[in-house]
Image (cartoon, coloured by chain):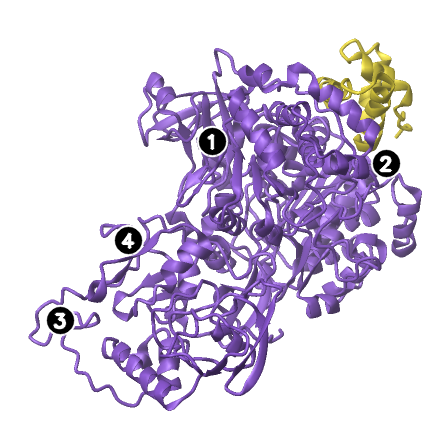
Amino acid sequence: MSHDKLVYMANQIATFFESKPHDEGVEGVAGHINAFWEPRMRRHLFEVLDAGGESLKPLVREAAAMIRRPVAA
Amino acid sequence: MKDFIIPDRDFGTPAAKSKQMVTLTIDGFDVTVPEGTSIMRAAAEIGISVPKLCATDSVDAFGSCRLCLVEIEGRAGTPASCTTPVAPGLKVHTQTGKLKQLRRGVMELYISDHPLDCLTCAANGDCELQDMAGAVGLRDVRYEAIDTHFRAKNTSGEANPQWLPKDDSNPYFTYDPSKCIVCSRCVRACEEVQGTFALTIQGRGWDSRVSAGTKADSFLTSDCVSCGACVQACPTATLQEKSVIDIGTPDRSVITTCAYCGVGCSFKAEMRGDELVRMVPYKHGKANRGHSCVKGRFAYGYATHRDRILNPMIRDTIHEPWREVSWTEALTFAANRLRGIQEQYGRQSIGVITSSRCTNEETYLVQKLARAVFRNNNTDTCARVCHSPTGYGLGQAFGTSAGTQDFDSVEETDVVIVIGANPTDGHPVFASRLKKRLRKGAQLIVVDPRRTDMVKSAHIKAAHHLALKPGTNVAVVTALAHVIVTEGLCDEAFIRERCEWDEFQDYAEFVSDPRHSPEATEMLTGVPAEEMRKAARLFATGGNGSIYYGLGVTEHSQGSTTVMAIANLAMLTGNIGRPGVGVNPLRGQNNVQGSCDMGSFPHELPGYRHVSRDDVREVFQQIWGVEIDNEPGLRIPNMLDAAVEGTFKGLYCQGEDILQSDPDTKHVSAGLAAMDCVIVHDLFLNETANYAHVFLPGSTFLEKDGTFTNAERRINRVRKVMAPKNGYADWEITQMLANAMGAGWAYTHPSQIMDEIALTTPSFAGVTYEKLETMGSVQWPCNEGAPEGTPLMHVNGFVRGKGKFIRTEYVATDEKTGPRFPLLLTTGRILSQYNVGAQTRRTANVVWHDEDVLEIHPHDAEVRGVNEGQWVRLASRSGDTTLRAKITDRVSPGVVYTTFHHPDTQANVITTDYSDWATNCPEYKVTAVQVSPSNGPSEWQEEYNQMAGLSRRILPAAE
């Protein structure tokens, strides 16, 4: 799965939640990714995040702490 | 096989709706009926059939045949019972000496101008003229006909100018003017039931003739949409199904459900032996009320098409020809490959795609296969690419993912918004019901980049057409809300009682911002601000307001946001929870609603309950006896991404052609090509099958039992009328595959699967096949709280408690026009074809649409040197294809439009991988493209056709 595509998708989600009050937005992004992203997708997202995640919107980076890190396959 | 004898009597005139009851006496019997009922219908209620020819209960009374005369004590003359309403205390006689004589005289005149070829007539045994001649005791015709309409030549051998030849231009029915009695039932059916106004009575008196279009037209060249309403209404053989001419009259009928769009019309499959003679819309079907469209009524020939594959096939690689093998060999091969993949690449490396064309029971089994046998949640369905944003958006706002109304609700609506939907083509029977209401005075607002037939056609005209630029739905709907909030048109009482007040206030603050005003967004949306304001005011103040929407809403980067914006609009105006209002997604395929309900999505178990919920998993674990994965699985686009990456290797795809229907064809084919085991379970070698290793032949809706759930949540029975030509119903095939992998399932009838669904899924708790037999159909939720189902949702409160207003900020899609791709392509459907066309392309429906064409505005065509009918190259950043141009101002300058029914066109080579932010529903409706003149098929089309040809080779069966 290309990192670019996942970054794009995560940022799209963040864009929607940017219109919410800040804390709700952070929870929203994390909640959405936890609910709909298969572990493989989250693993790749964490690869991006762990490498600094500059391409990700701030809301995604803030949400990272609340996103479930998949257990090793 | 079951023989259903269902009373389907013709009461002569439509039912009256008054609550005021009237009692009268007919032939000495008292009868009490609603005020406004005709005497004819009142008599029929107590079993007295007054002879009639021009009356039928699908259309209003007309009073022209003079056969249904009655005598009323104290009134002069012999009034027609069809046009005379009941009144209290009337004493009516339907059978007196005078009436008998009059009727016989009338019949004598009719028959004097009718050919007496009953024995060889296609309507023999099914002809009302014949029946009435018998009913009135016609024994003699005293008139010698000199001038007739039925003799081709007169007595001296000269051509008879009154004789007209049979019109057999329509592929499904004939018009034989020589048998016409000019009762005008066909004309009225075309007007009142279908609303197309294609038929008329031309001439007057003796010269009166039924005419499709003008004198120069045939049925095929006229505006006729071949819905069959006229054929249904015709009392003689004048309008006759060609299948009845070929086969003869049917001897039994079975009630079943159409397998085309999400309207879910009920039909009588009329049979002789195991041969289907015709499909006739079922009068008591609650979705269609006796109406049909060209697809459901006539386009079933694919079921016996020579392309249908009837034997299982396998091959080691996709470069080899197919080998026909036994079911055991095919299933063992498939099971071994899937298990092998899991051993090598892990439990998560395989998945399923359930079908929105298959039954609820079949879909339930396919997702169960993933969850209980594959032991993962890698299940998705084609709703991913159509209505997944509906699921998400309405779930967020209201707490459940479904339309709020039944279709009957449209009869009580006053203002309708149709947004991103083209019901006259996509959901024709609903369109007819809507048009009927519009002709009675309801107002219409159409939000669509194209001037669809809803905007203006015979006897209907939208009050406002907001011809927005593709991709600006959120801006438009939010601007409508802006007007309603800032002009104080909200239904505050409703909002205070039914919605979260704090959230409303937050939303009101958001939406009142001037940046959402029609004036501020006009440049963006292309919709004149004044028009937008008028539309908003009309919706907020015009009475019962309903919203119907389609894939023009969902298939965008902001699809889910638009669904929420629509929910906001309905809540703001208090238009939820009673007849005539509501938010109504028009579902694409017959069982999209059902496939979503059945847990096809990778994040939720049946009944829209997330897989992370321990209590829900426990319910299924108890019954299935296995542990269920608590992590969401892969969605279709993610499966393909994972396949390209090399971590997803096997797919069981039932009744879905992802290669043709999903966006960015090249990416789909790359994903499929990277897999080690693709199992296609379908009627035909579809495009996806070019990349398959196992082909399991499927069964049609005529060959199996089950249920479909339509767009109004109505669970309708599908009944087996013939044995599966491929040997097994689809649910049996899924079960055999599961058992080949060691599942040990033992269902012997789909009713047992429904029992399991009811046992595990609260909204289906009360659904049983017995209930469906008694009630005909039922709308979920059907459980202890609503044992007879739920026609209207959210009546006293939202499913989630209080309705939730959600901020809907417009974000422009990243798919932008520019110098290289200056036009916006949007895609859609046409009446005669369905989805990827696998079924309808294999019927005579191709006479209406045998190729996809590109609609382009005259200005855009002119600057590119494109002429009508010319080949053009259509290119986007994803790919290019060629098709013919159709120059029309139905599309605005800057917008082009095409359909995706034909694999040769491959419209999805053009569409991109952009998708809805919440659900990954692809953005089919907006692609930046360029159009240029071309000489013929593109390189891709030629290569693809060659590859497809090679891929479809089948080795002759071994001796």
Residue B337's disc is none
Q: In which quarter of the image is residue B677?
A: top right
Report which colour depicts chain B.
purple
Which amino acid type is marked by label 2?
Answer: Glu
Quadrant holding the N terminus of chain B: bottom right
Disc 1 is placed on an element classified as loop
Please tell me whether mark 2 sits on a helix, a strand or a loop: loop
**Sequence order check: which comes first, mark 2 or mark 4?**
4
Q: Distance between the residues labelled 4 and 3?
A: 22 Å
Task: Identify the element where label 4 is drawn.
Answer: loop
Task: Say the numbered circle drawn on residue B218.
Answer: 4
Closer to viewer: mark 3 or mark 2? 3
Q: Is residue B944 above or below residue B142?
A: above
Q: Are marks 4 and 3 in contact (CB under 8 Å)?
A: no
Front-lying residue, B499 or B335: B499
Q: Disc 1 residue type?
A: Arg
Q: Chain A is drawn in which colour?
A: yellow
Work out how far the residue at label 2 is from the one at label 4, CA to CA, in angstroms. 60 Å
Tell which subunit mark 3 falls on: B
Which badge, 3 or 2, is on the more N-terminal residue? 3
Q: Which amino acid does label 3 sit on?
A: Lys
Residue B558: x, y in percent? 66, 26
Q: Quadrant of residue B771?
A: bottom right
Residue at the front extreme of this rendering: B74
**Side of B432 relative to B751 (left or right):** left
Amino acid type, mark 4: Ser
Task: Tell which circle, 4 or 1, labels the residue nearer the N-terminal end.
Answer: 4
**Mark 1–mark 3 distance (CA, rounded to whole Å):** 51 Å
